[in-house]
Image (tube, rainbow, N blue to C red):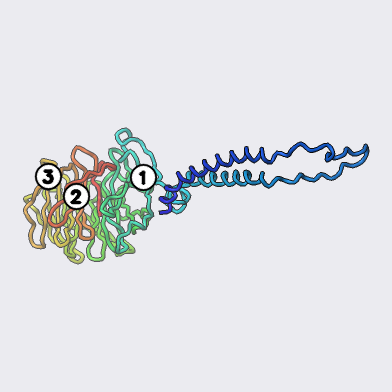
């Protein structure tokens, strides 16, 4: 409101300053003529002192009161003009440009994505503190992580708050040549990945304020990407062996330490296994190494149920698992086409496969995970390295939306 009043008064203040200046100038001229002293008579002139005598003390002539008026008026005009100038150049809102308001976001310019293979041409640093991203419950928000495009090994991340994905941010302490894995447990988002040139599995946690430093698990290695899921209050990791070992291994995390690795027994995979929870139970799905079929199993206590094949679905990359709240959801790329298919498990039977609506297609494994009652799917669009996402709710998938600021060379992860 103050800014509006000042804006309306400025023209009048300037006009007043100009008029006052004109009047002051006229009064200076007129006052000078009126206050000019008449020629002094000879008898009143001061006598010249005799040689050698000191000069008499000098006394200023009495000022004519009429000469003070134009001087005071001119001073007032200058003061009004100065105030008007200050009002003209005062920032809107009556404050310094950098007092109280946030500084404009610092932009880190990078090479063009098409020229340098970066996920985007411009990377923006976060404009808000990470703690502002916490959800209403204080938990870390939905999070997406992906590897850079082409041969770039950098890892990037973004969070979902306020109905939109935040600007991408690069990790400075981790990288990978495969796909990362994410899962949310106990208000935190956990991440696992394989470092370039090192087949060991690394992990880190995000609490909404920041990521912990990467930690290496010296007792486990993988040829592909690990998987993360949740069983009750425990975080579960599953992975394929290394150096030609296609067996699936798994381990649990109780919030302070990872258990020793164990073999899932009786199952082998040609790619990475998938983990997903629904109705309080954890499930695993994988592309069987022996026959290329899609199999699944459920965790009960400390053991997995016998593998079961789903004969109506085939894929060349492997499935992904998630939940719509009460049902388990599986998505996968087709075996002879890039279309995305999906199916749900109600606890007793799998539904018939359906083609994902809106024409979604990918050449890799989609990422699937649920947060706070919402099921997210993120994938790299076939023939395009950009990431695309959709959200499942009220029995239907939203129209796919392309994230123009991020690209990847592998499958993304979401939790």
Mark in the foreground, 3 or 1: 1
Is 249 or 411 nearer to us in this picture?
A: 411
Mark pair 3, 1: CA separation:
36 Å
Q: Which residue is mark 1?
A: 124
Q: Picture quarter containing residue 232?
A: bottom left
Mark pair 2, 1: CA separation:
24 Å
Q: Which residue is mark 2?
A: 390
The residue that appears at 29% across and 57% down in the rendered structure is 141
- Classify 207 as above or below 168: below
Q: Picture quarter containing residue 334?
A: top left
Q: Secondary structure at mark 2?
A: strand
Q: Which residue is mark 3?
A: 334
The residue that appears at 8% across and 50% down in the rendered structure is 354
Mark in the foreground, 3 or 2: 2
Q: Are marks 2 and 1 in contact (CB under 8 Å)?
A: no
Specify the label residue 249 is tagged with.
none
Q: Are marks 3 and 1 in contact (CB under 8 Å)?
A: no
On the image, the x and y values in percent for residue 238 come to 23, 55
The residue that appears at 19% across and 37% down in the rendered structure is 383
Is 229 or 146 nearer to us in this picture?
A: 146
Where does the C terminus fall, quadrant-wise? bottom left
Mark pair 3, 2: CA separation:
18 Å
- Classify 396 as above or below 11: below
Is 171 or 90 nearer to us in this picture?
A: 90
Q: Is residue 311 toward the left or the right of residue 102 in the image? A: left
Q: Is residue 46 visible?
A: yes
Q: Secondary structure at mark 3?
A: loop
Lower position in the chain sequence, tag 3 or tag 2: 3
């Amino acid at each position: 409101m103050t800014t509006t009043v000042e804006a309306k008064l400025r023209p009048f203040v300037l006009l007043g300053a100009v008029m006052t200046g004109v009047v002051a100038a006229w009064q200076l001229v007129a006052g000078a003529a009126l206050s000019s002293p008449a020629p002094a008579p000879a008898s009143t002139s001061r006598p010249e002192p005799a040689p050698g005598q000191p000069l008499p003390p000098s006394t200023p002539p009495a000022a004519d009161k009429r000469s003070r008026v134009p001087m005071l008026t001119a001073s007032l005009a200058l003061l009004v003009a100065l105030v008007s100038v200050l009002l003209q150049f005062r920032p809107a809102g009556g404050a310094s440009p950098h007092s109280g308001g946030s500084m404009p976001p610092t932009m880190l310019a990078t090479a063009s994505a098409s020229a340098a293979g970066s996920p985007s041409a411009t990377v923006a640093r976060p404009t808000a503190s990470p703690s502002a991203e916490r959800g209403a419950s204080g938990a870390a928000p939905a999070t997406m992580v992906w590897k850079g495009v082409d041969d770039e090994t950098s890892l990037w991340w973004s969070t979902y708050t306020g109905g939109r994905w935040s600007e991408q941010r690069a990790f400075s302490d981790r990288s990978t040549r495969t796909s990362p894995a994410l899962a949310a447990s106990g208000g935190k988002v956990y991440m696992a990945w394989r470092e370039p040139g090192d087949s060991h599995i690394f992990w880190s946690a995000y609490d909404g304020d920041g990521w912990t430093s990467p930690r290496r698990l010296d007792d486990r290695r993988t040829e592909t990407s690990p998987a993360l899921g949740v069983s009750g209050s425990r975080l579960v990791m599953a992975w394929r062996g290394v150096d030609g070992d296609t067996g699936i291994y798994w381990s649990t995390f109780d919030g302070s330490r990872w258990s020793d690795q164990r073999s899932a027994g009786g199952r082998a995979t040609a790619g990475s296994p998938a983990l997903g929870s629904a109705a309080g139970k954890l499930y695993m799905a994988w592309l069987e190494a022996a026959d290329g079929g899609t199999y699944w199993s459920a965790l009960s206590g400390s053991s997995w149920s016998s593998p079961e094949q789903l004969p109506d679905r085939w894929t060349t990359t492997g499935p992904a698992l998630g939940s719509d709240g009460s049902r388990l959801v599986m998505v996968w790329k087709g075996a002879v086409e890039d279309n995305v298919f999906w199916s749900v498990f109600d606890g007793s039977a799998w539904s018939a496969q359906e083609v994902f609506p809106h024409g979604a297609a990918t050449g890799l494994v989609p990422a699937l995970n649920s947060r706070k009652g919402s099921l997210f799917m993120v994938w790299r669009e076939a023939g395009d390295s950009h990431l695309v996402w959709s959200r499942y709710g009220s029995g239907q998938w939203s129209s796919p939306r392309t994230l123009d600021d991020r690209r990847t060379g592998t499958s993304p992860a979401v939790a």
